Amino acid sequence: MTDSPTAGTPYGTLPPASPLPQRRPVSLPRLAQMREAGEKITMLTAYDATFAAVADAAGVECILVGDSLGMVCQGLPSTVGVTLEHMAYHTASVARGLHRVQGTAWLIADLPYGSYAESREQALRSACQLMQAGAHMVKLEGGGWTAPTVQFLVERGVPVCAHLGLTPQTVHALGGYRVQGKGDQAAQQLRRQALELQDAGAAMLVLEMVPTPLARDLTQALPRCHTIGIGAGSGTAGQVLVMHDMLGINLGKNPKFVHDFMRDAGSVRGAIEAYVQAVKQGRFPDDAQHAWN
Ligand code: KIV
C-alpha cells in the first residue's frame, strides 16, 4: 500500500496530476496575463472531487462550483432552493479533489440565493464560509445594489466575480430564462452596472444570455474585469458552460448556447479537452449558432 490519498479504495480513484509544465497555479495575475496576451480563459462548472480533478487535468483554468448544482445534482426546479450549506459542502468536495491531484485551477464558488442580499456583513460571513471551504473567489448575481457589497468584500480580501444578464436566482422576477440587455435602454443599464462592478473591484464578470455585440462592447469597456460569457457570443475574455450540459448528459433539451462536446469525444476528459481547445482557438462559441446577435 502506498501513501497515495486514493490508495486502498477501489472507488473514484482520481486521474493523474496535470503534466508538470501546466502546473502553474492559476491566479488573478495569471488570468490578467492571459487576457493581455489575447488567450481566452476557460471555465467549467464542477460539483464533486472527481469531475473537478478531470477538468483540471484537461486544462480548464477556472472551475465554478455553480449553484446550478441545484438543478444538476439536486433535481430542483431552479437555483433558488440552494443553501449556503449545500454550496460549502460541494466547494469543499471540489477543493479536496483539486488538492489530491495537485490541481492548478482557480476555484470560484457561487454565493447562493438569500446569502448576500440582507447586508454587506451577511455577504462577508457567507463569503468567508465558502473561502474556508476552499474557494479562491466568490460569485454573486446582479447589478446596482450589489456594487457596494462587492467593494466591501474586495476591500476585505475576498476576490469577487459578478454576474449580469440572465441571473438565474432572480428568474421569477425576470419572468423566465430570457435574453437580457436587448434594446438601447436595457443595454445602457447593463453597461452602467458592469462599469460600477469593475469600479467596485470585481475581477471577473459572468455575462449570461446577452447579445453578442453588447458582450463584446462590455469586454472592451472592462480592462480590469474579465468577462466570461455563457450565451454571450465569442467576444468575451473567456467562456463558461455547465459541465453536465457540455457532456450531453442532462435529461432535457440544451439551450442553444450549449455544444455537446461528448458527441465526438471518446471520454469525459477528451470532451473537456475539446472544449478547452475550441474556446482557445475561437471555434466555440460560433456566433451564428450559439448566440444572440
Ligand atoms: O450556477 C452556475 O453554474 C452559473 C453558470 C451558469 C455561469 O452561474
Image: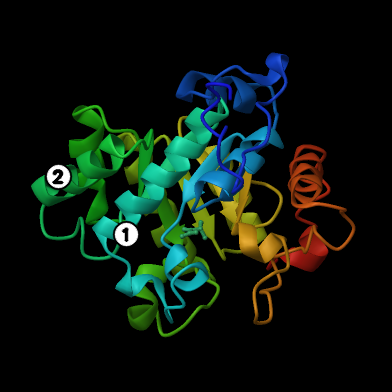
Q: Report how many numbered discs are placed on residues in the image.
A: 2
**Would you place residue 229 above or below residue 156 in this image?**
below
* Left or right for 120, reference 19: left
Report the disc number at residue 86. Answer: 1
Q: Of residues 123 and 190, which is closer to you in this image? A: 123
**Mark 2: is the Cβ under 8 angstroms from ligand 1?**
no
Q: Quadrant of residue 204?
A: top left
**Would you place residue 186 above or below residue 2 in this image?**
below
The kind of residue on which mark 2 rests is Arg
* Left or right for 68, reference 10: left
Crowd tier of the residue under label 2, counting other residues whose Cα lies within 10 Å: few below 14, some 14–19, many 20 or above: some
Report x, y in % for residue 202.
36, 38
* Left or right for 195, reference 221: left
* Residue positioned 46% across, 83% down in the render: 176
**Mark 1: is the Cβ under 8 angstroms from ligand 1?**
no
* Quadrant of the drawing holding the N terminus: top right
* Residue positioned 68% across, 68% down in the render: 292
Report x, y in % for residue 77.
43, 82
> What is the C-alpha distance between the residues marked 2 and 1?
15 Å
Q: Quadrant of residue 135?
A: top left
Report the disc number at residue 125. Answer: 2
Compare marks 2 and 1 and give the one earlier in the sequence: 1
